[in-house]
Image (cartoon, grey):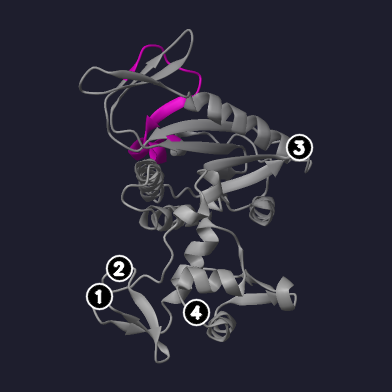
């Protein structure tokens, strides 16, 4: 039973907004494009894993939670996928790498090999999963749950893999995962059906969404580098201006009323989670403070304070 589905992360939307609001000549633009490509590729690989995992339908009680982040003793750890059974828990780490993978031993190394012959060492996913196993075991022990935790590495691409020596942790392609999980024996009942559900609910309650915002700060980009303005949903240009109680695009002529809310969301992703009337006027490229007050009141915001100290908390939630 899937308790927590995987969903598109707000980080992707934030990176799209950041790349879109950087000028063509901005030195950070290419770096943001590459980051967005990697994040989207990782998400697509995880979705492919989820597609194959739908074939795993055992008769015994179990729970599946995708994309879970927990906190143990101030340390956050993210798990691509969790399988909880009555006998054990499996942490799956999904990797989306199109090139040939060479797994070397003594010391353990993962190497990405390009068709050109260039070889680049990768951070060992086994080390990553071992860390997560350790933290999850401690998280469970803090709740008086003693449960064996194991890990697996799943590669989303059906690329060539050369393993010089079989590692201690299982490595496979995503299409192999359902059969592998079915092969794992349920030797003893540590958790009952009700306890599996209770643990799943506890994990859901303690899950924390990854929050990389504001992205301008994360990438050391000055807010002045972010292009202001309301973007036209039809032509994608920064040409929308407020005119006669509507937003009108002076490039394609499209007219709408809600487009500024997307710009508010961009501000939240890129700059900060609050906004003053003056900042709103700057970012929406309008002059009237009364109009700004009116539009902010129509948006999902909360006014904090009065007078010069007044600001709005942005409460946009997709």
Task: Using the numbered discs, state the Cα–Cα distance from disc 3 to disc 4 in whole angstroms.
Answer: 58 Å
Task: Using the numbered discs, state the Cα–Cα distance from disc 4 to disc 1 in whole angstroms.
Answer: 21 Å
- Counting every numbered tag in the picture gives 4
Q: Which mark is residue 251?
A: 1
For this orientation, the residue located farthest to the top is 106
Camera-near label (1 vs 3) is 1
Residue at the spot 58% in from the left edge and 43% down from the top edge = 85
> Tags 2 and 1 in contact by the CB under 8 Å rule?
yes
Q: Horizontally, is 145 left or right of 90 in the view?
A: right
Q: Which residue is mark 2?
A: 237
Q: Earlier in the sequence, mark 1 or mark 3?
A: 3
Element assignment for label 2: loop
Residue at the spot 27% in from the left edge and 74% down from the top edge = 234
- Judge whether residue 185 is colored magenta: no
Q: Which residue is mark 4?
A: 287
> Tags 1 and 3 in contact by the CB under 8 Å rule?
no
Who is closer to the viewer here, 219 or 57?
Answer: 219
Q: Earlier in the sequence, mark 4 or mark 1?
A: 1
Q: Which residue is mark 3?
A: 141
Categorize mark 3 by other alpha carbons within 10 Å: few (<14), some (14-19), many (20+): few
- Judge whether residue 170 is colored magenta: yes
Range of magenta residues: 162-180
Element assignment for label 1: loop
Q: Which quadrant of the figure has residue 114? A: top left
> Tags 3 and 2 in contact by the CB under 8 Å rule?
no
Residue at the spot 55% in from the left edge and 81% down from the top edge = 292
């Amino acid at each position: 039973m899937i308790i927590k589905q995987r969903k598109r992360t707000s980080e992707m939307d934030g990176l799209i907004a950041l790349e879109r609001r950087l000028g063509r000549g901005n030195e950070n633009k290419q770096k943001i494009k590459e980051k967005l490509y990697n994040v989207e590729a990782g998400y697509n690989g995880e979705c492919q894993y989820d597609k194959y995992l739908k074939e795993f339908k055992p008769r015994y009680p179990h729970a599946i939670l995708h994309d879970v982040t927990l906190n143990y003793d101030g340390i956050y750890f993210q798990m691509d996928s969790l399988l909880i059974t009555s006998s054990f828990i499996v942490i799956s780490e999904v990797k989306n790498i199109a090139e040939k993978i060479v797994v070397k031993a003594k010391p353990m190394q993962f190497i990405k090999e390009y068709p050109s012959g260039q070889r680049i060492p990768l951070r060992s996913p086994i080390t990553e999963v071992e860390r997560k196993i350790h933290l999850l075991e401690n998280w469970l022990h803090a709740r008086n749950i003693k449960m064996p935790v194991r890990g697996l590495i799943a590669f989303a691409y059906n690329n060539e893999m050369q393993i010089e020596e079989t590692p201690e942790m299982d490595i496979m392609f995503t299409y192999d995962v359902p059969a592998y999980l079915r092969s794992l024996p349920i030797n003893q009942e540590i958790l009952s059906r009700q306890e599996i559900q209770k643990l799943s609910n506890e994990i859901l309650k303690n899950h924390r969404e990854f929050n990389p915002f504001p992205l301008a700060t994360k990438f050391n980009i000055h807010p002045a580098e972010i292009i202001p303005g309301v973007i036209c949903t039809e032509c994608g240009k920064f040409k929308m201006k407020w005119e006669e109680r509507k937003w009108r695009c002076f490039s394609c002529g499209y007219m709408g009323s809600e487009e500024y809310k997307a710009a508010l969301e961009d501000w939240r992703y890129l700059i900060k989670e609050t906004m003053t009337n003056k900042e709103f006027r700057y970012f929406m490229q309008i002059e009237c403070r009364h109009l700004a007050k009116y539009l902010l009141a129509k948006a999902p915001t909360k006014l904090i304070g009065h007078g010069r100290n007044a600001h709005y908390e942005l409460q946009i939630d997709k």
